[in-house]
Amino acid sequence: MNVFGIGLPEMAVIGAIALLVFGPKRLPEFGRTLGKTLKGFQAASKEFEREIHKTMAEPESIDQTVMEETTQQDTKSIIGSPKEAKKHPAS
């Protein structure tokens, strides 16, 4: 078992020192707090990753929308708008 580059013996030493410093009554409280904090970081990380993927996929849809709008504008400029066609009927 290796968490953040810390093996089981190192974790045991850290746990023993924490037990001596904080005492057996406060140690579970710190454990819960640490667990909640890590869970919050994990959720934030997943949300950030989702936003990155969404942003990376967005330019493709934006490019498609811009191409469609440009094509519509080009068609209108060549053909003219329906209002202009009524003003100037074909000869």
Image: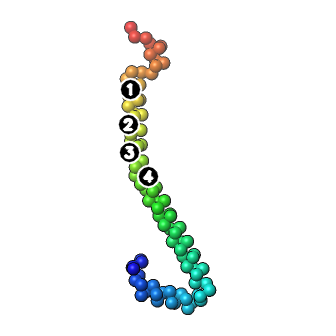
Q: Counting other residues with Cα less than 10 Å from the Cα at mark 4, is it few (<14), some (14-19), or many (20 or more)?
A: few
The three-letter code of the residue at mark 4 reads Lys
Q: Nearer the viewer, residue 36 or 1?
A: 1
Q: Counting other residues with Cα less than 10 Å from the Cα at mark 2, is it few (<14), some (14-19), or many (20 or more)?
A: few
Residue at mark 3 to residue at mark 1: CA–CA distance: 23 Å
Residue drawn at x 38%, y 8% is 91
Which residue is disc 2 drawn over? Answer: 67
Which residue is disc 1 drawn over? Answer: 75
**Which quarter of the rendering shows the N terminus?**
bottom left
Residue at mark 1 to residue at mark 4: CA–CA distance: 32 Å
Residue at mark 2 to residue at mark 3: CA–CA distance: 11 Å
Q: Are marks 3 and 1 in contact (CB under 8 Å)?
A: no
Q: Along the polypeptide, which appears first: circle 1 or circle 2? A: 2
Which residue is disc 3 drawn over? Answer: 60
Nearest to the eye among marks 3 and 1: give it.
3
Residue at mark 3 to residue at mark 4: CA–CA distance: 11 Å
Residue drawn at x 41%, y 25% is 76
Its colouring scheme is: rainbow
Where residue 13 sits: x, y (%)?
46, 89
Badge 4 element: helix
Where residue 55 sits: x, y (%)?
43, 52
